[in-house]
Amino acid sequence: MKVHEYQAKEILKKYNVPVQDGIAIKDISEFDAAIAQLQSRGINQFVIKSQIHAGGRGKGKIYNPENRNELILEGGVKFTASVEKAREYAQKILGNLLVTHQTGSDGKIVKTIFVAEGLDYKKELYLGILLDRVVSKNVIMASTEGGVEIEKVAEETPEKILKEWIDPSVGFQPYQARSLAFGLGLAGAAFKNFVGFISKLYKAYEETDASLLEINPLVITNDDQIVALDAKMNFDDNAMYRHPDIVAYRDFNEEDPLEIEASKYNLNYIKLDGNVGCMVNGAGLAMATMDIIKLAGGQPANFLDVGGGANKETVANGFKIILSDPNVKAILINIFGGIVRCDRVAQGVIDAVNEIGVNVPVVIRLEGTNAAEAKDLLENSGLNFEVALSLKEAAEKVTSVLLVETI
Amino acid sequence: MSILLDKKTRVVVQGITGSEGSFHTQQMIEYGTNVVAGVTPGKGGTKFLGVPVFNTVAEAVKSVKANASAIFVPPQFAADAILEAANAGVKLIVCITEGIPAKDMIHVYNSIKQKDVTMIGPNCPGLISPGKAKIGIMPGFIHKRGNVGVVSRSGTLTYEAVKQLSDLNIGQSTCVGIGGDPVIGSRFVDIVKLFNEDPDTKGIVMIGEIGGSAEEEAAQFIKKNVKKPVVGFIAGRTAPAGRRMGHAGAIISGGKGTAAEKMAAMKKAGIYVVESPAEIGITMKKALDKLNSKPSAKKLSVKKSAKTKTKKSVRSKNRNW
């Protein structure tokens, strides 16, 4: 699960991690009150920050969603010392479309902006905490190369990334904090503040079941304070049952409406840009089926794992979700019936098609228990199915169906 | 032979009285697994599906000498169940449960690492030594006793590969589903090592997917140590970056963990990497056929050094199947 920058900062504040101050607003009518409040805290320069889940906001571009050719503003994060200018930026960003290298060309409508304090600082650093899957331990990464993409630093100058792995039996140790601080070349008050900062930050990561906590940039202010200028937090979905407060931060605007709909039916669905929909049991087989579609000359329109119980309801719901995507020209159903019997799945597919009406060609491959009976059922259903027994045959049928569709 | 599991393995099922646990215990017993006990706290002293139920794993180990555990408890309690089994002295732990928080698994993994215990999973179908025993949820009937070891991060995709092998009359020594989570007890390299040491395993099928670098790690090991033919497939070539594809561990993050990277590393290690999942079985058949045609070369008393050379050239020539 992902949260916005301003939400991550709210969470970090609870752990006394020093973060850039600011107020999130959803409507321009809230702007004056937000500014007044910041001014009352002695803040006189401001940053208007677009709140979307994708990165690259600073280098992004703001467009008019009604007319995609109309560029409204260069940059989705704007600094200014003038309240008038800040208001102008806020107006230009709110409700408009932000396109960054991570959003794709569709961009994202900015529904929230973070009106934040503009800090003067002398140095940008990088901090990241995540699971290192190679050793099954969390790792803290720090670098003097803040403010740029860390992947690039890792690629070009890996020696500039310091790492400390956390032994889960004893937790994060003070010597590790010092080691990072020395490694970053810090001294004096900045050193002391960094050690405090990183200890609190790791506590926040650990206690919230985060899967990623990235501060880029982390800044050293002119008076040697260590402050999180940005904050990115992702959380482990498997652990969210013990964090209702974090679940409350979920922003449905950031998710695909079809994916939200699918999750209501307990279907694991991810929308993609292709033309062949697919319905599969099991995540690995679902990915492999997407790959097969590509090899057959199509493009997968989605990932869809219907899970263990592929019955009439799940199949019908799967069809509804897949067919809501207008790009879908054909559907491939690939179910491996191990414990679940294929003839039952076949009956489920027939009932679902009769019930909701499917107007694109459907290739079905059912393998496993009672696969032959399932094939008979499908072929004698009077419905227009292309039935395949093997995975190879299924791929070939997808190819031929696509050929007919394009002619 | 087989790895990790055979007819003699004495299995205790943790969560035996739950709906998943009871269904699959029944299936395991029908397949021939030596299920000697169940554990459900509070139900000790009763019998369930014909086996004694204990309150703790330690009692099951003491009373009926259980040496392997199958875990079917809900995710909130699964980490605790694994630790209980490990500390009771069980040597093989198979955790089927999906949805265990990564933080819990980090603690479990690092805690049992020093112990003499093998853990499979979590979020996995388990393992099966065909014709002997199974611990897990895979359909037994698609498997066939034989000499190919299968290791995979997936469930149904593993069944798919196994079915292809069995249909071509290629049996399996043991099939291990290592699980789709980012933190798992045994990784590809651990299982490949066991297959490599098992004299009855003649070939290895390795089915990976996007996310992490466990396939690359195994490829390194294979390159250095494995002479048996290895057929590999990576699921998720069409998966978008930054999205979790069903399995908690199947995500391309920061541009790392792509199928292309993994396939390149595997090809470099001499693994027969298939582009299509429909070709896993047939590719293994070709590899084994090559292998079986070699003893004739042996009969012609080719010098040892020449023999290894032949092997190498055969492998590299066939990389592009």
Image: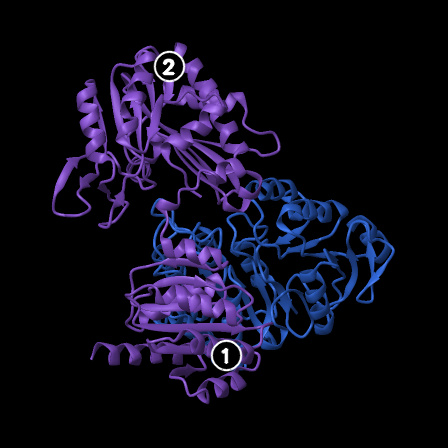
Q: Would residue B257 appear left or right of B180 to someone viewing this image? A: left
Q: Residue at x 71, y 47 (%)?
A: B86
Q: Residue at x 69, y 66 (%)?
A: B23
x, y percent for residue B162: 53, 73
Q: Is residue A39 visible?
A: yes
The quarter of the image holding the N terminus of chain B is: bottom right
- Per the model, the C-alpha gap separating discs 2 and 1 is 65 Å
The label on residue A70 is: none
Q: Would residue B148 appear left or right of A123 to someone viewing this image? A: right
Of helix, strand and loop, which one carries label 1?
A: helix
Give amino acid for label 1: Ala
x, y percent for residue B233: 43, 65
The residue nearer to you, when weighing A132 against A239, is A239
Q: Are marks 2 and 1 on the same chain?
A: yes
Nearest to N terminus: mark 2 or mark 1: 2
Chain letter for mark 1, please: A
Q: Residues within 10 Å of mark 2 (few under 14, many from 20)?
A: some
Give amino acid for label 2: Gln
**Palette colour of chain A:** purple
| Chain whose colour in the figure is blue | B
The residue nearer to you, when weighing A76 against B95, is A76
Q: Circle 2 sits on which residue?
A: A225
Q: Would residue A294 appear left or right of B84 to someone viewing this image? A: left
Give the number of the mark in front: 2 or 1: 1
x, y percent for residue B59: 83, 50
Q: Residues within 10 Å of mark 1 (few under 14, many from 20)?
A: many
The quarter of the image holding the C terminus of chain B is: bottom left
Q: Circle 1 sits on which residue?
A: A346
Chain letter for mark 2, please: A
**Residue at the front extreme?**
A29
x, y percent for residue A394: 39, 78
